[in-house]
Image (cartoon, rainbow, N blue to C red):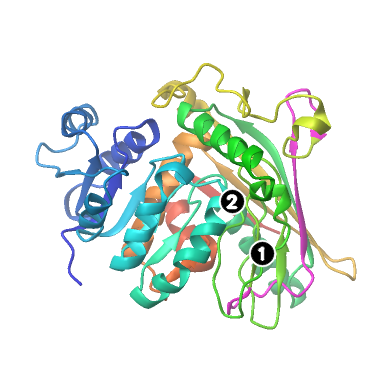
């Protein structure tokens, strides 16, 4: 079906949405530019964003509101892919996922809210398969470097040893960045949901059952390429939006039937620790120096300065182990603040990858499962990421 636009950036007046729109406006011009628009509740605010980011005066503006399902469905009918930063997704996202699934529209977001994603999978995966909608959660730092990092590692393992590693460890060796008010709000909403319903706590969802052949989302910390129907793997949850699932799917890079993984990071005091747990470490889990259990004074729309984003970076080491003692390593790096400077590029390139580079059946996917090598190529060429293995 012919659509008016390749992409619509929904939530462009927010902190991260504006960064995505600015990236598209400055990085894609002339014949290389996609057809795109920005969307939000306020036309006046959208006009200001358009002027501030240096976009053409004729960049289309689309009015859409999470509280008005008809406006969301109308927006979805006009675009091949919706990029959404309107969160917390558990509060403002269900109607948009439903609209994309119903209209066969591609969808990418930055969600790190696992219980909500579980509900969306159950509610909309089958309809998305029928309509052809490719819905991809967590297209930012929470997932993509880990998803593609393990893909890169397993490619090297198969090259060196003829089979994939059965155990993968990821270590966040270096990270420099900040937090936005929107991320703080999403973290608080997730914690509030867990307090109301202990079953919605990510740590309580150790195993999510799915049928063979179903592509399910999303493992944000240490995910692995999807696997053949006869294989199964479990990605465990840890705090800070690290999502988990069991996934069965055909893929040329099977990870084996008993792959295990884990994530460690280097803390500010130089000690190694798991990705924060309030009770274990006696304090708040932190990202970029801000508590995830409090706003740090940040309000939605606020975040790191341009200088802070441009001076940010990250480095992730992956270690793969085989039963016979074989080892393989992979490294992923990024040249900007991970949560915003790099994430805004990752999600924009994910959307363009859906439009220009990959096909695939409808349903709910992980970024690496659907886009894999094609997305890695885009991120290397356009978004300042590097991937290496030995």
Residue lying at 66% horizontally and 64% vertically, measured from the top left: 208
* Frontmost residue, 385 versus 36: 36
Tell me where residue 342 appears, x and y as whole percent.
Answer: 47, 40
Q: What crowding class fits label 1: few (fewer than 14 Cα within 10 Å), some (14-19), or many (20 or more)?
A: few
What label sits on residue 229 in the rendered view?
A: none
Q: Is residue 262 magenta?
A: yes
* Residue that numbered label 1 is attached to: 208
Tell me where residue 244 appears, x and y as whole percent.
Answer: 65, 56
21 up-or-down from 246: above or below: above
247 up-or-down from 108: above or below: below
Residue lying at 81% horizontally and 29% vertically, measured from the top left: 281
Q: What's drawn in magenta, residue-wise?
A: 248-272
Secondary structure category for the residue under label 1: loop
* Residue that numbered label 2 is attached to: 114
Tell me where residue 267 appears, x and y as whole percent.
Answer: 74, 29
- The N terminus is located in which quarter? bottom left
Determine the CA span between mark 2 and mark 1. 11 Å
Tell me where residue 313 appears, x and y as whole percent.
Answer: 56, 34
Residue 23 horizontal side relative to residue 289, left or right: left
141 up-or-down from 228: above or below: above
Could you tell me if residue 373 is visible in this image?
Answer: no
């Amino acid at each position: 079906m012919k659509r008016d636009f390749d992409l619509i950036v929904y939530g462009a007046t927010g902190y991260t949405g504006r960064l995505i729109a600015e990236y598209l406006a400055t990085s894609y011009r002339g014949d290389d530019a996609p057809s795109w628009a920005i969307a939000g509740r306020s036309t006046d605010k959208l006009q200001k964003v358009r002027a501030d980011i240096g976009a053409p005066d004729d960049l289309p503006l689309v009015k859409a509101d999470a509280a008005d399902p008809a406006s969301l469905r109308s927006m979805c009918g006009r675009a091949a892919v919706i990029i959404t930063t309107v969160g917390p997704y558990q509060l403002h996202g269900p109607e948009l996922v439903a609209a994309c699934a119903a209209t066969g529209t591609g969808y990418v977001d930055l969600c790190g809210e696992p219980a909500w994603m579980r509900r969306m999978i159950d509610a909309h995966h089958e309809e998305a398969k029928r309509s052809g909608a490719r819905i991809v959660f967590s297209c930012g730092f929470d997932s993509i470097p880990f998803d593609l990092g393990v893909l890169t590692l397993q490619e090297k393992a198969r090259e060196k040893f003829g089979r994939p590693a059965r155990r993968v460890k990821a270590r966040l060796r270096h990270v420099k960045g900040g937090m936005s008010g929107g991320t703080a709000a999403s973290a608080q909403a997730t914690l509030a949901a867990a307090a109301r319903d202990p079953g919605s706590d990510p740590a309580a969802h150790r195993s999510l059952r799915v049928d063979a052949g179903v592509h399910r989302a999303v493992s944000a910390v240490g995910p692995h390429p999807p696997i053949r129907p006869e294989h199964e793997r479990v990605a465990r949850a840890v705090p800070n939006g690290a999502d988990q699932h069991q996934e069965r799917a055909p893929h040329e890079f099977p990870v084996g039937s008993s792959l295990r993984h884990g994530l460690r990071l280097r803390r500010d005091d130089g000690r190694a620790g798991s990705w924060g747990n309030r009770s274990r470490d006696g304090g708040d889990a932190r990202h970029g120096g801000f508590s995830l259990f409090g706003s740090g004074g940040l309000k939605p729309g606020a975040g790191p300065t341009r200088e802070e984003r441009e001076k940010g970076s990250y480095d992730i080491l992956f270690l793969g182990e085989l039963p016979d003692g074989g080892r393989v390593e992979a490294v992923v790096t990024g040249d900007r603040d991970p949560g915003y400077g790099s994430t805004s590029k990752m999600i924009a390139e994910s959307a363009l990858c859906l439009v220009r580079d990959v096909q695939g059946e409808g349903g709910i996917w992980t970024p690496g499962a659907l886009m894999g090598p094609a997305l890695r190529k885009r991120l290397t060429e356009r978004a300042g990421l590097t991937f290496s293995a030995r």
